Amino acid sequence: MSETVKYPMPKTGAEYATKLFASMEQSPEVRRLIEAAHHVLAGGKVEVSVIEKGDAARVAELTALSVEARRQSNDANLAAGTYVTLIP
């Protein structure tokens, strides 16, 4: 069994991360985006374009969830005076 750790995360962050990681299993497009992000993190450059827009309401919901998760994470970190939570 893999070693696990507990890491504090706001509920919205966990919801967003769950949606992201679950979609990696089902969507080759998401896997390619994650691979592209790895290249950016390693100093590379990428291009991303939307070929066909998704459901506008769902896009807005995911964007709002991401923004709220970052806000809650930043608030928790600021209150603690140190980095105590993940920021999705």
Image (cartoon, rainbow, N blue to C red):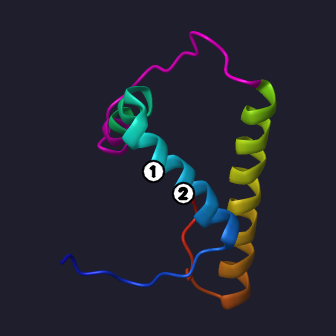
* Relative height, residue 77 to residue 72 (above, below): below
Which residue is at 74% across, 70% downward? 72
Is residue 14 covered in magenta? no
Find residue 21 and name its label.
1
* Viewer-closest of 30 and 84: 30
Q: CA distance from mark 1 to mark 2?
A: 6 Å
Instruction: Report which residue position mark 2 lands on.
Output: 17
Count of numbered badges drawn on the protein? 2
Tag 1–tag 2 contact (CB < 8 Å) = yes
Q: Amino acid at mark 1?
A: Phe
**Quarter of the view holding residue 70:** bottom right
* Viewer-closest of 82 and 84: 84
**Quarter of the view holding residue 40:** top left
Which residue is at 63% across, 60% downward? 15
* Relative height, residue 60 to residue 52 (above, below): below
Give the class, few, some or many, for how many residues have Cα within 10 Å of label 1's Cα (few <14, many ≥20).
Answer: few
Q: Quadrant of the C terminus?
A: bottom right
Q: Position of residue 69 (x, y in %)?
A: 69, 61
**Quarter of the view holding residue 14:** bottom right
Q: Position of residue 81 (x, y in %)?
A: 65, 88
* Relative height, residue 63 to residue 59 (above, below): below
Q: Tag 2, which secondary structure?
A: helix
Q: Position of residue 1 (x, y in %)?
A: 18, 78
Image side of residue 45 versus residue 73, left or right: left
Classified by dominant secondary structure, the portion drawn in magenta counts as loop
Q: Report the residue that reaches farthest toward the left.
A: 1
The segment highlighted magenta reads 38-55
